[in-house]
Image (cartoon, grey):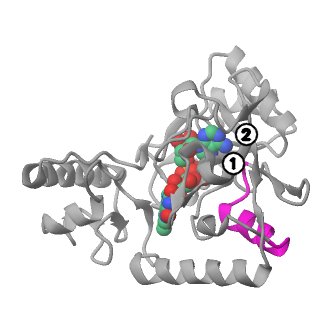
Amino acid sequence: MMEMTTFQQKIADLFPNIALRFNESMEKHTSFRIGGPAEVMAFPKSPAELSELLQKTKALGIVAPVLGAGTNVLAPDTGIDGLVICLKDALEGMEQLDGTHIRVFAGVTMTRAAVFAAERDLGGMEFAHGIPGTVGGGVYMNAGAYGGEIKDICESVDVMDAVGNCKTYTAEEMQFAYRHSCLEDSGGVVVSAVFKLTPKPRGEVRALMQELIGKRKASQPLELPSAGSAFKRPVGGYAAALIDQAGLKGYRVGDAAVSEKHAGFVVNLGNATAHDVQELLRQVSDIVFEKSGIRLEPEVRIW
Ligand SMILES: Cc1cc2nc3c(=O)[nH]c(=O)nc-3n(C[C@H](O)[C@H](O)[C@H](O)COP(=O)(O)OP(=O)(O)OC[C@H]3O[C@@H](n4cnc5c(N)ncnc54)[C@H](O)[C@@H]3O)c2cc1C
């Protein structure tokens, strides 16, 4: 076994009751299957554990990035020195509050939340079934698909600040916009969200979810590691159409490639590095700009 670094020992001593993993490969925690080891990864199982982590690390001047399911993150090949806080499979829980509202904790996947809603004869979350991220990541990004987005169903969000204090934000205060919330500017960790749904027979909800999954399977390269759409939708066009029109389907840097099936996806053909993906994103953006005058910006978060 590798000897612990001073930092690892310090975190282990500070948080004896919180689940920690050392030298944890980011490959295992990102849908791109890319990234070197995180020096320490912490898995807080409750808001109290998350608060303790944030409070004590802040006091030491440690800033820890928060990871959900890693389905929109490109992690560095060299790994991450310091601490990563992972909420997927950790900060979990769902409850029905009344006839139309559910509360979901940040580490639950959006697919599980949508199924939970369906089982209670609640519709409105069908669009989120099949988005592979967590509710925390989905709220942070205002995830959306097939005409729906988190903004449409979100009533309020419990957010923890850098010193571990929790505040409830209304949907308006979250300032949701296309793949954006105020947390991108102000920081803060999503602890849980309350969604307002609509009574709808579960058969109908399930049928719509199946239809949308069918559309995904038909159009997206789900058999290869990716982070979904690599670029944000630009004003005045669609990233996938612009990339396709520029003749870039199949364009490669190392083992990172523009998907042949869906030009908006960058896929890992086997051994792609974060460097390959970043270089591919840069080249695709430049070529599309040369041909169309439209500049594509990455949607994937580059850590
Ligand atoms: C095959 C595939 C299909 C996809 N389809 C869609 C789609 O249809 N629509 C869509 O919108 N996206 C899609 N995505 C992208 C991705 O699933 C979403 O962006 C999702 O919301 C990311 O959630 P996550 O938990 O994986 O976040 P992560 O990738 O772990 O993190 C993304 C960002 O959110 C931050 N974050 C994560 N959790 C929290 C939290 N609790 N509090 C504060 N910040 C947090 C992270 O720090 C990071 O900056 C797809 C991805 C894949 C791989």
- The answer to whether 94 appears left or right of 228 in the picture is right
Q: Which residues are magenta?
A: 106-121
In the image, residue 275 sits, relative to residue 187, either above or below, namely: below
Can you tell which quarter of the image residue 230 is in? bottom left
**Label 1: which residue?**
154
- Residue 296 falls inside the magenta stretch: no
- Tag 1: amino acid: Cys
- Residue 112 falls inside the magenta stretch: yes
Kind of element beneath mark 2: strand
CA neighbours of label 2 inside 10 A, class few (<14), some (14 to 19), many (20+): many
In the image, residue 98 sits, relative to residue 18, either above or below, namely: below
Residue nearer the viewer, 298 or 129? 129
In 3D space, how far apart are the residues under numbered discs 1 and 2 (Cα atoms)? 8 Å
Query: Which of label 1 and label 2 is nearer to you?
Result: 1
Q: Does residue 40 show up?
A: no
Residue lying at 48% horizontally and 80% vertically, measured from the top left: 215
Where residue 160 appears, as percent x and y from the top left, is 73, 30
Where residue 255 appears, as percent x and y from the top left, is 29, 65
In the image, the residue with mark 2 has its CB under 8 Å from the nearest atom of ligand 1: no
Predominant SS of the magenta segment = helix
Kind of element beneath mark 1: strand
